[in-house]
Image (spheres, rainbow, N blue to C red):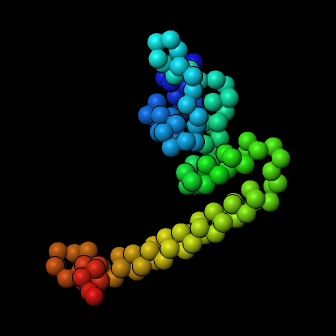
Protein backbone atom coordinates (compact mmCIF):
# COMPACT_ATOMS: atom_id res chain seq x y z
CA UNK A 1 0.00 0.00 0.00
CA UNK A 2 1.18 3.56 -0.66
CA UNK A 3 1.82 6.22 1.98
CA UNK A 4 -1.69 7.70 1.79
CA UNK A 5 -3.26 4.29 2.28
CA UNK A 6 -0.87 3.49 5.14
CA UNK A 7 -1.61 6.84 6.77
CA UNK A 8 -5.35 6.25 6.54
CA UNK A 9 -5.01 2.72 7.89
CA UNK A 10 -3.07 3.75 10.99
CA UNK A 11 -4.48 7.22 11.64
CA UNK A 12 -1.31 9.17 10.94
CA UNK A 13 -0.48 11.78 8.36
CA UNK A 14 1.84 10.95 5.48
CA UNK A 15 4.10 13.71 6.77
CA UNK A 16 4.41 11.99 10.17
CA UNK A 17 5.20 8.66 8.52
CA UNK A 18 7.95 10.31 6.47
CA UNK A 19 9.25 11.91 9.68
CA UNK A 20 9.43 8.52 11.40
CA UNK A 21 11.40 7.21 8.43
CA UNK A 22 13.72 10.23 8.48
CA UNK A 23 14.58 9.82 12.17
CA UNK A 24 15.01 6.06 11.84
CA UNK A 25 12.00 4.76 13.75
CA UNK A 26 10.59 3.17 10.62
CA UNK A 27 12.87 1.61 8.02
CA UNK A 28 12.53 3.08 4.56
CA UNK A 29 10.12 0.86 2.65
CA UNK A 30 10.76 -0.45 -0.83
CA UNK A 31 9.50 1.71 -3.66
CA UNK A 32 7.37 0.93 -6.67
CA UNK A 33 8.66 1.39 -10.19
CA UNK A 34 7.06 4.83 -10.08
CA UNK A 35 9.01 5.74 -6.94
CA UNK A 36 6.11 5.46 -4.48
CA UNK A 37 6.75 4.03 -1.04
CA UNK A 38 5.18 0.60 -0.56
CA UNK A 39 4.20 -0.29 3.02
CA UNK A 40 3.60 -3.78 4.35
CA UNK A 41 1.41 -5.02 7.17
CA UNK A 42 4.56 -5.21 9.27
CA UNK A 43 5.18 -1.50 8.65
CA UNK A 44 1.62 -0.74 9.75
CA UNK A 45 2.17 -2.80 12.89
CA UNK A 46 5.35 -0.83 13.63
CA UNK A 47 3.52 2.47 13.05
CA UNK A 48 0.82 1.33 15.48
CA UNK A 49 3.49 0.51 18.06
CA UNK A 50 5.03 3.96 17.63
CA UNK A 51 1.66 5.67 17.87
CA UNK A 52 0.69 3.83 21.06
CA UNK A 53 4.07 4.62 22.63
CA UNK A 54 3.66 8.30 21.73
CA UNK A 55 0.21 8.36 23.37
CA UNK A 56 1.90 7.14 26.54
CA UNK A 57 4.31 10.06 26.35
CA UNK A 58 7.50 8.22 25.48
CA UNK A 59 10.10 10.41 23.76
CA UNK A 60 11.25 9.59 20.24
CA UNK A 61 14.54 8.36 21.67
CA UNK A 62 12.71 6.11 24.13
CA UNK A 63 10.45 4.84 21.34
CA UNK A 64 13.51 3.98 19.28
CA UNK A 65 14.88 2.01 22.22
CA UNK A 66 11.52 0.28 22.74
CA UNK A 67 11.36 -0.64 19.05
CA UNK A 68 14.82 -2.18 19.28
CA UNK A 69 13.76 -4.16 22.33
CA UNK A 70 10.46 -5.18 20.70
CA UNK A 71 12.27 -6.53 17.66
CA UNK A 72 14.86 -8.40 19.77
CA UNK A 73 13.12 -11.64 20.69
CA UNK A 74 16.00 -12.64 22.98
CA UNK A 75 15.71 -9.52 25.15
CA UNK A 76 14.78 -9.67 28.78
CA UNK A 77 11.78 -7.80 30.04
CA UNK A 78 13.95 -6.20 32.73
CA UNK A 79 15.31 -3.62 30.30
CA UNK A 80 11.79 -2.78 29.07
CA UNK A 81 10.61 -2.40 32.63
CA UNK A 82 13.58 -0.17 33.55
CA UNK A 83 12.89 2.11 30.58
CA UNK A 84 9.22 2.28 31.51
CA UNK A 85 10.01 2.97 35.18
CA UNK A 86 12.30 5.85 34.19
CA UNK A 87 9.57 7.29 31.98
CA UNK A 88 7.04 6.90 34.78
CA UNK A 89 9.35 8.83 37.12
CA UNK A 90 9.61 11.64 34.54
CA UNK A 91 5.81 11.74 34.24
CA UNK A 92 5.40 11.91 38.02
CA UNK A 93 7.79 14.88 38.15
CA UNK A 94 5.82 16.63 35.40
CA UNK A 95 2.58 15.95 37.26
CA UNK A 96 4.04 17.51 40.42
CA UNK A 97 5.20 20.55 38.44
CA UNK A 98 1.80 20.92 36.76
CA UNK A 99 0.01 20.57 40.11
CA UNK A 100 2.22 23.29 41.60
CA UNK A 101 1.43 25.58 38.64
CA UNK A 102 -2.26 24.83 39.04
CA UNK A 103 -2.20 25.59 42.76
CA UNK A 104 -0.35 28.89 42.23
CA UNK A 105 -2.69 29.99 39.46
CA UNK A 106 -5.77 29.00 41.47
CA UNK A 107 -4.51 31.03 44.44
CA UNK A 108 -3.79 34.05 42.24
CA UNK A 109 -7.21 33.80 40.56
CA UNK A 110 -8.88 33.66 43.99
CA UNK A 111 -7.00 36.79 45.09
CA UNK A 112 -8.04 38.80 42.02
CA UNK A 113 -11.37 40.59 42.28
CA UNK A 114 -11.74 40.69 38.51
CA UNK A 115 -13.41 44.09 38.56
CA UNK A 116 -12.85 47.32 36.62
CA UNK A 117 -9.97 48.50 38.82
CA UNK A 118 -6.43 48.23 37.42
CA UNK A 119 -5.03 46.64 40.61
CA UNK A 120 -4.47 42.96 39.89
CA UNK A 121 -2.57 40.51 42.10
CA UNK A 122 -1.96 38.24 39.09
CA UNK A 123 -0.12 40.96 37.18
CA UNK A 124 1.64 42.08 40.36
CA UNK A 125 2.86 38.53 41.01
CA UNK A 126 4.14 38.14 37.44
CA UNK A 127 5.91 41.50 37.64
CA UNK A 128 7.64 40.83 40.96
CA UNK A 129 11.29 39.73 40.97
Say left or right for 8 vs 127.
Answer: right
* Camera-side residue of 108 and 82: 82
Residue occupying the point 19% across, 82% down? 119
Asked whether residue 70 appears in the rendered view, the answer is yes
Residue occupying the point 49% across, 23% down? 4
Residue occupying the point 57% across, 72% down? 93
Q: Is residue 40 above or below residue 124?
A: above
Q: Is residue 98 above or below residue 107?
A: above
Q: Is residue 30 above or below residue 11?
A: above
Residue 55: x and y in percent read 58, 49
* Camera-side residue of 32 and 107: 32
Residue 9: x and y in percent read 58, 26
Number of marks in picture: 0
Asked whether residue 121 appears in the rendered view, the answer is no
Residue 103: x and y in percent read 46, 77
Which quadrant of the rendered structure holds the N terminus? top right
Task: Work out which residue is located at the far top of the displayed protein and give it.
Answer: 33
Amino acid sequence: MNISQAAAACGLSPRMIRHYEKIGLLPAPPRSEGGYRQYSQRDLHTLGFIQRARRLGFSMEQIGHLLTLWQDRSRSSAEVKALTAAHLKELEEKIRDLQAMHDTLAELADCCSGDDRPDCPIIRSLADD
